[in-house]
Image (cartoon, rainbow, N blue to C red):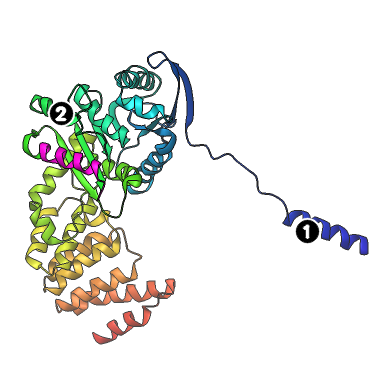
Amino acid sequence: MKSIFFILLLISSTISHAQPESIDNVIGQNYTFASKILNEDRTIQIYTPSSYSESLDKNYPVLYILDGQRLFLDGVSVVQSFTSQFQLSPDIIVVGINNKYPDRFNHFLGTNFLDFIENEVVSYIEDQYRTSKERLLFGWEYAGAFVIESMIKRPQLFNAHLAASPYPIHEKWFNNQSRIDMLEAVLDKELTSYLYVTISANEGMVEDGTNELEALLKSKATENLRWDYRVIEGAEHTSTAYPGIYHGLRSYYHNYKKLQFNSLSEFKDKGGIAHVYEYYKGRAERFGFSEDLPPWTMFSLSRNAIRADSFTDFESLMNEFKGKGMINNIRLDRAMSLASYYSKYNKYHDALFIYEQLITKNRDSAILQNAIGDVYVMLKENKKAKPYYKKAIALAKAQKDAKLVDYQNDLKRIK
């Protein structure tokens, strides 16, 4: 007996101390190659989204991140959040271009690093991967200044130039010219790229340059150059790269997400329903989506009118959206809230119109059956209300619905 107990104890101890299986956490792949332009070995990191291997006919934009040895994983993290959870951008390939100290500074101030990126890195990526030829370049500090220089010298190489705390840009280090001088010389050539610049407050020499840059863009940039300048509160020079990647991508893909306003007044200030249609037209042209308004957008606009308790705006929006598939393509409780608001203003037939659309797909909803009964009572048609109340009670009993007593009392009131 003791031996059996000992064996069981040994087995239990072995199981309790068993180590979980270890699997490497791999994000992308590293490639090291001999650069003929830089005359040295260079390493790049490449991340492809999970859909890459599943959709063989799909092409992807590429985000190139300078100082990949430090920022590649941050870029991947942002992209994964954007695409897998929040639908803020299309799926993106991320390429980290590694660098090392102290050569890092010389490369970003040199004359051949841009050649290396274009002719060795970009050409390799587009030869080996399915890209859409849409390219974004991100850099911080010296790399951020290099990002701006790349827009000046090769304006067609990248579609978006994202620079965090760019330095140096106003010092005359380049044949008695600054990068701002160089940019001013080409602004009238109608640059069609996108430029995003971010800094933190109190960055000293960095801020001196970016303030000068902002003033130049405000005074001389044409409408073809879309740009944004952002000061991030609470950040510091060493941390601007991280929010810079996030906000830069959000700004560049500003019309990717479904449109939503925080309030009715914001909706009106932005141009009302005309702005909404224009937004979805531009979104469709850029990303290939349908121009049709998504059910969520239509509902959120109507809900803003409810929250502002503006029945005039609510009714106008509901008339605008009639027949566009909103009611049966949003959650039942949300659709019922629209009908309930009609009832609040004694528009019972309009409420009934919504409920009748919903009942075809939701016959087993006790709360919906009861709501229809309520509307008929409001219309003083108790005879029509009874079968809905009875159906609500039967469903509530079968489903053990806590509202059963309420439904029973509703029926009693009209007997």
Q: Check disc 2 and report its element: helix, strand or loop.
A: helix
Q: Dot 1: few (<14), some (14–19), or many (≥20) neighbours within 10 Å?
A: few
Measured in 3D between alpha carbons, the distance from the residue under mark 2 to the one under mark 1, in whole angstroms, is 72 Å
Q: What residue type is labelled 2?
A: Leu
> Which residue is at the front of the view, 336 or 250?
250
Residue 281 lies, in percent from the top left, at: 14, 40
* Magenta-highlighted residues: 202-217
Mark 2 / mark 1, whichever is N-terminal: 1
Q: Would you say residue 152 sits in the magenta stretch?
A: no
| Residue drawn where x is 44% and y is 34% of the image | 69
In the picture, measured across the screen, residue 133 lies left or right of residue 186, that is right
> Which residue is at the front of the view, 400 or 169?
169
> Which residue is at the front of the view, 50 or 343?
50
| Residue drawn where x is 38% and y is 29% of the image | 104
| Residue drawn where x is 15% and y is 44% of the image | 279
In the picture, measured across the screen, residue 95 lies left or right of residue 328, that is right
* Magenta-colored segment: predominant secondary structure: helix
Q: How many labels does the image show?
A: 2
Residue 88 lies, in percent from the top left, at: 29, 45
Q: Is residue 238 visible?
A: yes
In the picture, measured across the screen, residue 142 lies left or right of residue 337, that is right
| Residue drawn where x is 40% and y is 77% of the image | 402
- Quadrant where the N terminus is found in the figure: bottom right
- Quadrant where the C terminus is found in the figure: bottom left
Disc 2 designates what residue? 183
Q: Dot 2: few (<14), some (14–19), or many (≥20) neighbours within 10 Å?
A: many
Residue 107 lies, in percent from the top left, at: 35, 25
Q: What residue type is labelled 1?
A: Ser
Q: Is residue 318 visible?
A: no
Disc 1 designates what residue? 12
Residue 150 lies, in percent from the top left, at: 25, 26
